[in-house]
Amino acid sequence: MTLTKSSQSAAEAQEELAPLILLPLDGSRTAEQALPVAGTIAHRSGTKVHLASVVPQAPVFVASGEELVADPGLEQELRDQLTEYLRSTAEALETTHGVEVTYALLDGSPARALADHARAKRVGLIVMTAHGHSGISRFWLGSVADRLLRWVKAPVLLLRPTDGALQTVFRHTLIALDGLTEGERVLEPAIELGSLCPESQFTLGQVVEPPVALITRMAMQPAKMRPHWADLQQNCARSYLERVATRMRTRGLRVATQMVAASGIGEQILGLAHAIGADLIVVGTHGARGVERMLLGSVADKVVRGASQPVLVVPTRKDEE
C-alpha cells in the first residue's frame, strides 16, 4: 500500500502503486458510510479517491404480451442513474474533504470487475463496508467483500456498518504477526494507515498455540512432550516481537508487544484487540488465487467476521505475475 507521496524518480514511481484509494459503492447507505473514512484518509495522506460501481449483469425485462423481453432503454436508464449517482457523490466528497475524486461505472461480476479495475488503476488501498453481525448488507457489498479479498493485491480496509458515524482516524493499531518473514508484509500498510493520526500507537501481537503432541511410529499413542517446549516457543515469540518493535521504534513510532499463549488464534486476536482498546486490527492473508474458498479457512476470516472494529486485510502472498 502506497498512500504517501515521495520524491522518487519517475521510473521508480511507475513501479510503485499509485496513491489512489478505491471506494466501491452500490447505492446503499451502508456502502456510503465508508465515504468520510476514505475522504479523511485521502486528505491526510495527500492521495486521491476513486469511486466505482458495477452495473448489474441481469438484463432489465418488461412484459410484452405474454412474454418478458429485455429492454435496452431501461438498461441505459439504469446506467445513466448510476453515473449521475457517482458524479454527485464524487462532487460532494470533493467539497467536504477537499480531495480529488474520480469515478467509474463497471460491468460484470461485482467482485471480479472491482478486482480487475483495482489492478488496472494500480490502487494502493480499498476502503469498503463489510457485512454486519446480522448478515450481509441489503445490496451486493456484503458478499462482494468476501470474494474481493481473494483476488486483490491491494490492502482492503473493511469497516463495520453502524447506526452512527464511523471512526475516521485510528489511534491504536493491533498488528497480528505470525513470526514468519512473509507475515511482516502487513507492517508497512499498517504503519502508513496508523501513522495518519499524530498520536497513534501500535501493538504487535502474536498468538502461540500449545504444542501438539505427535503420534509415534511404533504406537498410536501421543509422544511425550518435553516440558520446556512450550516455554521455548513463547520465549522465541517474545524475542521476535521485540526485534520487530525495535525496528519500528527507530522510526519514532510508539510500539508495544503482546504474546498470547492459548488455542484459537483468531479468537485470541479479537480478545487481545478488546483488551488493549485497539480501534484497528491488521491481519495478513495469502488469499486464494482462482480458488473459491474462505480466507485461508482461516485466521483472517475469523477476525474479519468477529471484529467490532475496522480490519485492514493485507495480502501477503508473493505475486506470480
Image (cartoon, rainbow, N blue to C red):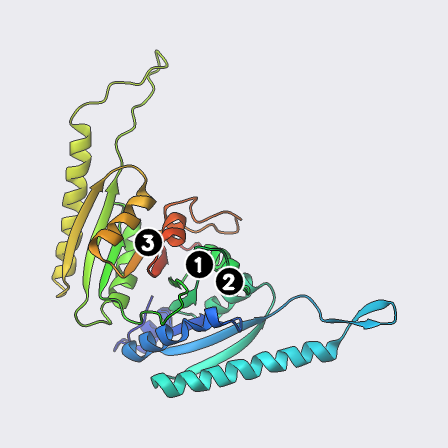
Residue that mark 2 sits on: 137
Amino acid tagged 1: Gly
Q: Are marks 1 and 2 in contact (CB under 8 Å)?
A: yes
**Residue depicted at 88% across the width and 71% down the height:** 65
What is the x, y in percent for residue 183?
30, 50
Q: Secondary structure at mark 1?
A: loop
The image shows residue 176, relative to residue 27, as above or below, that is: above
Residue 283: give its label: 3
Position of 224 compared to 156: left or right?
left
Q: Looking at the image, can residue 19 be seen?
A: no
Amino acid tagged 2: Ser
Q: Which of 255/161 is in front?
A: 161
Q: Of callouts 1 and 3, which one flags the residue occurring earlier in the amino acid sequence?
A: 1
In which quarter of the view is residue 19 placed?
bottom left
What is the x, y in percent for residue 93?
41, 83
Position of 154 compared to 222: left or right?
right
In which quarter of the view is residue 74 placed?
bottom right
Amino acid tagged 3: Val
- Decide: few, some or many residues near mark 2? Use Cα within 10 Å; few <14, some 14-19, many ≥20: some
Nearer the observer: mark 2 or 3; the answer is 2
**Residue depicted at 50% across the width and 85% down the height:** 88
Residue that mark 1 sits on: 132
In which quarter of the view is residue 264 placed?
top left
Q: Residue furthest front?
A: 163
